[in-house]
Amino acid sequence: MDNLLSKITENLLRQKSVVLVGSTDSGKTYWIQNTLIPHLESLNNKVEYLKDGSELSKGSPGVVICDEVETLFDKDYLQGSSPEDYYTPEYLEKVRQWHENYARLPKSTLFVITRNKPDQIKNLLENFRKSDWDDREVVVFKFEK
């Protein structure tokens, strides 16, 4: 975890957008709130935590952390592994609204994405290089317990 902490910190402090991908209940949010945020604050950074894409930044923090982020980058990949309609039109409209909010966030933002299957996580790690909300470059890391 120390290596992950240093890599994420280094990228955020260089004004890079970072994606952290891991499975449900893996401890991502706990680690962010209890390790990453205190660490960034100890380096004199103002950090703002957003619980999901429906929230907007309320100031001018040095670093923003947005939890429960959704990307459609891997939409076709996810639908290919699911026989039912993976995304409803209502959900896609919510995602479109969240994407508008993500695009307003500073470059120095950590976007937290949940994917549960190892191949879904691997797909993002290997292929997700530009966000689908504003085409910003992203650096992707895997979160593991």
Image: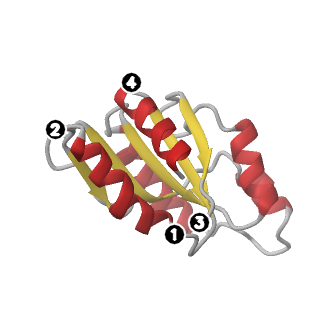
Label 3 residue SS: helix
Residue pointed to by mark 4: 14
| Numbered mark located on residue 89 in the image | 3
Q: Amino acid at mark 2?
A: Ser
Residue 17: x, y in percent? 45, 34
Q: CA distance from mark 1 to mark 4?
A: 25 Å
**In contact (CB < 8 Å): disc 3 and disc 4:** no
Residue pointed to by mark 2: 60
Front position among marks 4 and 2: 4
Label 4 residue SS: loop
Front position among marks 1 and 2: 1
Front position among marks 3 and 1: 1
Q: Amino acid at mark 3?
A: Pro
Front position among marks 2 and 3: 2
Circle 2 packing at 10 Å, graded few (<14), some (14-19), many (20+), is few
Residue 42: x, y in percent? 23, 44
Left or right, 121 with respect to 88, comes to: right
Residue pointed to by mark 1: 27
Quadrant hosting residue 62: top left
Label 1 residue SS: loop
**In contact (CB < 8 Å): disc 1 and disc 4:** no
Is residue 4 visible from the viewing direction of this image?
yes
Earlier in the chain: of badge 1 and badge 2, it is: 1
Earlier in the chain: of badge 4 and badge 2, it is: 4
Q: CA distance from mark 3 to mark 4?
A: 37 Å
Q: Amino acid at mark 1?
A: Gly
Left or right, 52 with respect to 80, comes to: left
